[in-house]
Image: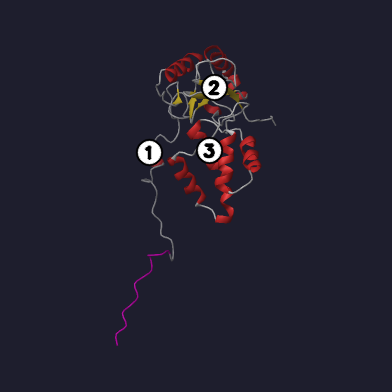
Amino acid sequence: MSVRRLAKEQPASFTFSAETLEKANWWIAKYPESRRQSAVIPILWLVQKQEGWVSEPAITAIAKLLGMPQIRVFEVATFYTMFMLEPVGSAALIQVCGTTPCMLRGSDALIKVCKDKIGPKDKLSADGKFTWQEVECLGACCNAPMAQINDYYYEDLTPENLAQIIDDFAAGKSPKPGPYNGRHTSEPLGGVTSLTDPKLYDGSAAKKIKIPNAPGTEAPKPEVKA
């Protein structure tokens, strides 16, 4: 397990935005009052969405909000790698999968693009717009090589289209996520080869069957005349 520490340079304070606090209270309301600390993970995520990362003042604020020791929030924030403990790029956080399927499909070339266009991994770029990381399997092996950029997956990448994606983010655009080789989601490259007839999956070919004693199938009761 890697050692994860808070950034050396920290902001002087942290304040929940009105929107973040509203959503935090919504999560807290899901639990009994005595178990409100169970909302710590979603609230850490809300804070990260607000600030881009999780700072020490934010951890302190979350601890006060949930009525729990600060060290407990710190333990959660440092355990889960989805929480960024240092400032990240304002335009994009790029997480390139470097595990075996992606490596065999060319993730090394994607990593080189990130090094050339952004700089060292895990470091904020000189212009403050980008951070990139090499991460373990993101679960999209059939669309290798791929990367998660901010909240979305960008799949079937080449060095050329990753470079263009980075340029688009730098220009303030929002590149479309998903496969970049023309396929739909994770279908075969040559197109669908099975379940090509909609009747096989839309229910139109299904036979109607009668289920004995099913609700609504009871025979009408005969009238009883006085």
- Distance (Cα) linking label 1 and label 3: 40 Å
The amino acid type of the residue labelled 2 equals: Thr
**73 displayed left or right of 43:** right
Q: Earlier in the sequence, mark 1 or mark 3?
A: 3
- Give the residue number, with chain letter if any, for mark 1: 198
Of 55 and 122, which appears nearest the observer?
55
SS at circle 2:
strand
Q: Position of residue 187 (x, y in %)?
A: 46, 29
Residue furthest out toward the bottom: 226
Residue at the image point whose x is 62% and y is 28% from the top? 7
The disc at residue 36 is none
The amino acid type of the residue labelled 1 equals: Pro
Q: Quadrant of the C terminus?
A: bottom left
- Distance (Cα) linking label 1 and label 2: 44 Å
SS at circle 3:
helix
Of 18 and 93, which appears nearest the observer?
18
Residue density around tag 2, few if under 14, some if 14–19, many if 20 or more, within 10 Å: many
Q: Earlier in the sequence, mark 1 or mark 2?
A: 2
Q: Which residues are magenta?
A: 214-226
- Give the residue number, with chain letter if any, for mark 2: 131
Residue at the image point whose x is 53% and y is 42% from the top? 43
- Give the residue number, with chain letter if any, for mark 3: 45
